[in-house]
Structure formats: C-alpha cells, structure tokens
Image (cartoon, coloured by chain):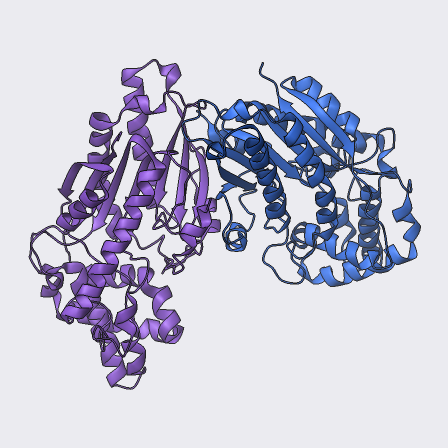
Chain colours: A purple, B blue
Amino acid sequence: MAAAQESSKFCEAFPMKSGDGPKSYAKNSTFQREAVDVAKQLIVKEIAEKLDIDILLSSKSNTFHIADLGCSTGPNTFSAVEGILEAVQLKYQSQMMNSQVPEFQVFFNDHTTNDFNMLFKSLPQNRPYYAVGVPGSFYGRIFPNASIHFVHSSFSLHWLSRVPKQVVDRNSPAWNKGRIQYSNSTDEVVRAYEAQFAEDMGCFLHARAQEIVHGGLMVIIIPGRPNGSSHSDSVANATLLLVGSCLMDMAKEGVLLEEKVDSFNLPMYYMSPQELEAAVEQNGFFSIERLEYLPRVPVDDTVSEQLASHLRAALEGLIKQQFGEEILDELFDRYCKKVEEQFSILEIESGKPTHFLAALKRKAN
Amino acid sequence: MAAAQESSKFCEAFPMKSGDGPKSYAKNSTFQREAVDVAKQLIVKEIAEKLDIDILLSSKSNTFHIADLGCSTGPNTFSAVEGILEAVQLKYQSQMMNSQVPEFQVFFNDHTTNDFNMLFKSLPQNRPYYAVGVPGSFYGRIFPNASIHFVHSSFSLHWLSRVPKQVVDRNSPAWNKGRIQYSNSTDEVVRAYEAQFAEDMGCFLHARAQEIVHGGLMVIIIPGRPNGSSHSDSVANATLLLVGSCLMDMAKEGVLLEEKVDSFNLPMYYMSPQELEAAVEQNGFFSIERLEYLPRVPVDDTVSEQLASHLRAALEGLIKQQFGEEILDELFDRYCKKVEEQFSILEIESGKPTHFLAALKRKAN
C-alpha cells in the first residue's frame, strides 16, 4: 500500500498566512465568506434532496464522515461544516427515528505546512462533532477507500499542485517572462497552465472517487470564470495581473530584480464550469447533480483595501519566499493604489458571475 | 450530542517541549524509547494471539483504525505505530487472502496545545497508513462510538487531567506546602492524588469503552510503581522529589519565592498494576489479557545528564509557567548535580521494575 507515497508526489505547498494577526488569512477571508453564505443555502438544499441516508447502513459505528479540503485555519471552514452537519441531521430526523441520527466526525484537511495548531485552537467549543486534522495535498490520496460520506471544498481548487515547469524554464517556448500568471500571456503559457489544471483535476477526482462512499456527495465552491469567456476576461485573473504589473513597476524602478519576476509564477488557475464538466466526464465516477453560478459580491468603495488585504493574506507566503519580506508593504500599497486607479478592471464582464458551485454524487458503479 | 462538551471539561493541558531543538521532547525521549522497544515485542505477540480479525467484518471501508493517545511529536509514536501495523498485517496475511489485508488509518492524539505542526512535518515519508491528528484530552471522548480497532498509549497515563484542587489550597488539610508532588507528603495529599487518579482513570476507561469496537485491543505502557511498594519507593517519584528539593533550595537562597513552590504541584501519578486492575474491574467493559512489568533500563554513568534532559523536556512548560524561563538552566544544573550526589536514589528497590504494560480487550458485552 502506498497511502503516503501517492500524495508525497505533490511536494509543493502554498499555505495561507498563518496565525490570527491583522494580516492573517483568518481575518481576511470575508470575500470567501460571502460566497460561502450563499453557497450554504444551496448545500442545504442539495443534502435535503440528494443525500441518500442509507449510505451509513452496515457501518458499525453509525458515524457520518465529513471532509473539508483546503480548510486553512478558519473561521469559514467551521461555518461551512456546521451548515452541512445541520442539514444532514435534519435529513435523518425527517426520515428516521431521532435515536438513529448519526454521530459526526469532521476531517479538516490542508497542506502539511498549514497552521494546524491554530486551526485546532480555534475549533468551536461545544462542537457537535469529533474533529481531526488531515495533513497532505488533496491532489493525492488522503483518506482510506470508501471512508468519506460528504466532501466540501471551498475556494481551494483554484490552487494548482504546482507551477507548470515550462513557464519558469528560460529555454522553453512557454517561458513566462515578465508576468506572474497565464492570462494576457502567450498561447504556450496558457496551454501549460491548462495542462497542469487538467492533470491536477484528474488526480483530484481520481482520489476522491476512491475515498467517497458510493452515493456520497461532494460540494465544491470554485472561484472561476464564466463559460465562454477568455482567461483575461476573468476578474480573478485581472486582479492578479495587477499584482504582476506592480512587481514589474518595482523591477523597473530597481526595487527588485526583473529576473526574480521572470522566475516567479502563481500556481493558480481559474476554471470554467465547462472545464469542470469535462474533467468529471473523463473521470467517470461522479454524476453532476448541480452546477450553478454564485452571485457576485457587490463592489463598494472599500474594495481596493479589501482586495489588497485579501490577496496579501493569500499570496504573502509565496511572495515573501521569492522576493523577501521587505517588499510586502510597498507591493500591496502600490496594488491598492492601482486598483483605485483602474477601478473599471473589477467591473470586467460586469454582472457576470465568476464563482460557481458544483455538487457531485459518487456513482454506485 | 456533546462530543466536545464532554472533553472540554478537561481544560488543563501539559504539553511536552515542542519543536525539535536540543532540549525538545522529540530529542529527549530515549528513556521511553528503550521501554517501547521491549514493549513492541509484547505488542506483536498480543496481536498475533489475541486480535480478532473479524472485527473489520461488515465495515464498508475495510480500514483498520489505530489510535495513539498522548503521541507528543514523535519519533516514538511513529515507531510504535509501525510495529502495531506490521503485526496486524501479518495476522491478516496469515489468516486470509493477501487481497483482504486492510488499509490503515492512524489517529495521533494529544492535547490541543501539542505541537501538531511539528508532528505532521515529522510524519515518515512513504508511510503505509493515512495519518490524522486528533486534538483533545484523552480523559474525555475524542472518537465516535465503536470507531477504533486498536488503541496504543505509551508513557502518557501518568499525566493526570489536573492537579488535585485541594493540594494548592492553603486552607485545605491537603495543602502541599514546600513540595511539588505527593510522595513523602502527608496522608491527605496522597489521598487527594489517589482520588484524582481514580477519577481520571475511570473517565479514561469509560471513554475508551465507547470508542473501541467490541473485540478491539488497547495496549498501554505505564511508568508506574511495583505492586506492594509505597509511593516514595518509586524511582519516578524519587526523581521528581529531587526536582522539588532543588526548587526549595533555590527558594531558601532567595532565587525564587517559596510561595511559588507552595502553589506548584505536578499533575503526575505513578500507579501500580493493582490500581489499574481495580479501575478496569470497576469499569467492567474490558478484560485484562496481559499485565506485565517491563525490564528496567540499566543505569550508566551518563544517567544524571540523561535524566536532567529527559525531565526538562517533560516539565519545562509547567515550570516556566510558574517560575519563569530564567530559572530553567540553573534548576536543571542543580538537579543534575543532585542526582550525581545521590546516585543511590536511582537504585531504590534495585532491580525491581517500575514500568508495566497492560493489554486490554473490549468485551463484546
């Protein structure tokens, strides 16, 4: 058996800013929370309509296993888990005797470098579930066969397992000079990112198909781009493009080395619902029960600061590693100003939603 | 349900020194490792003779669940788990087709304040099991009903859930003035510690009886004292007595306040095999399959330094909290000298073993 072998292939980890200081991920995830709140209602509906409560039958322990993949340190993960748990309880109560409502065990997963100490200290008191932490990349196997009844993953699947190798290789036609991601880049770079995404999504679905019980559900909330839009038309890519442009400004002013920008790329990819559908079809073990855009978070005049805090919490680790801690304040100050100047960039495809929710059911074969 | 309510009663945590520096627990647990190595052979034997491989039948996932309670940050926990896993594999291979050898999921448990980040980073590469971390006191419920097949706990059950309240209460007849634990103390203090032990052990067995599947095994390795010996005759208590005596010396010399010693007590208790038997009988859900002393680790001329490092790794957190970090070096230098002067104290009841191993089986009711 090679439980860990399989996942140790995925060696790169991109932890969110840990701890609970003012710049931490825990304090700067409101962008996600708003989408999670909307998604919550859809999850409740999905559980009520689609969850097969017989999946626990013949399980000795009568325990319902929920996994949150890419949990970071909270608080969004706790709020999402509570919503799921209440919906499952309701479903059991409505269909069976109260005494048969299961116990719950929740598996909080993230990279080994995630701040699990902080996650564990933040666990809600009096939580109605048994909590465990699961270190490892969700692009590999992290659970035994047929051991999970419900998988949730929110704002995590846009992180690739790694930066595609070619884009940082000077001798490759896909070398991504002067940019930090694929949108607005050459076709070769775009194709390299698309291929990495396809490989990663394949691994993700392959692993989950083994881990989720037949009839089990998986709900994923994905920051992506609308069907039929180009990569550069996506708001997420537009905001990252501005980070790259700030870095290049700083390189031109001599604050940092241009080579450092050339060799820096973000391991993020914003898929469309169609791309997800294609991956699910190729995998073959899941049916798509729901695929739905989430409403866009309305933009107000504090958006530039919010975006800067949000991005900083998400990217600080990666940027520090490449450019050093000393550039962080300046970079995000510049970023904040650039967003204010180019406010219209956030209104790309105005009104068109970008985040979406997918509910998949593990087929019974 | 009150999964967390039950365990949140147990609010005190006594983490081992975290990280992997020269004074860390990870680097100073050779005393335990030697006993663990001897215990390993007994565990293998116990699994070969007593494990009922049918306990996995009717489990959908065919996963064997091992829990290590009080795992700290390693490396002993990994070595123990590997031994158990290999023995279980062997048992399955000898009795069933190879294809039916189960997968393994290992639950590493310790207090919420344990350094799980370090534990996760130290997990062996290519481990043949799925690893998870479980934060919380093992004196409360930490797992769902009937969800664990094998429990292992090594050198953890001498930690009480708390210091008995009376011994730090100036107005109680059990006030433990001028001492930091119960041996060589008054009858009232001894009784307070004995009562705390009995309560804790009751909670421990009560929780495990619910969590372990019928027919499941629990092997615990306990640093204790021989049957029929007094508390003060135990080597473990003798070594702790010397720590107390160093603290009192320092108080008399004005290095620290005597009141600080008066209000400081160690939450540790060294039980005898008979005391364990009584607790198991009272609980009623386990049969004792084996109860056996482990051989004493031979003492050589580096023992004083080894003991000082070992005790420092175990007690540093508690002592720092009460007396401040600045006294640590001096305290353990004094301790080391005192052990050298009073070498004979380590030969108390010379030859008599103190650590013991108990193998319990969850009755099928």
Could you say where residue B235 lies in the image, as x and y percent from the top left? 84, 43
Give the quarter of the image for residue A188: bottom left
Give the quarter of the image for residue B185: top right
B182 up-or-down from A138: above or below: above
Q: Nearer the viewer, residue A177 or B7?
A: A177
Could you say where residue A134 lies in the image, as x and y percent from the top left? 44, 45
- The tally of labels here is 0
Q: Residue at image x 36%, y 73%?
A: A322
Q: Point out the image quarter for the C terminus of chain B.
A: top right
Q: Nearer the viewer, residue B182 or A274?
A: A274
Q: Point out the image quarter for the N terminus of chain B.
A: top left
A326 up-or-down from A117: above or below: below
B297 left or right, relative to B341: left
Q: Nearer the viewer, residue B231 or A20?
A: B231
Q: Nearer the viewer, residue A333 or B38?
A: B38
Q: Residue at image x 57%, y 39%?
A: B85
A213 up-or-down from A112: above or below: above
Residue A12 seen in render: yes
Could you say where residue B156 lies in the image, as x and y percent from the top left? 67, 40
B233 left or right, relative to A174: right
Q: Residue at image x 61%, y 37%?
A: B87
A352 left or right, relative to B46: left
A67 up-or-down from A348: above or below: above
Residue B319 seen in render: no
Could you say where residue A48 lies in the image, as x and y percent from the top left? 23, 26
B306 left or right, relative to B351: left
Q: Residue at image x 34%, y 53%?
A: A27
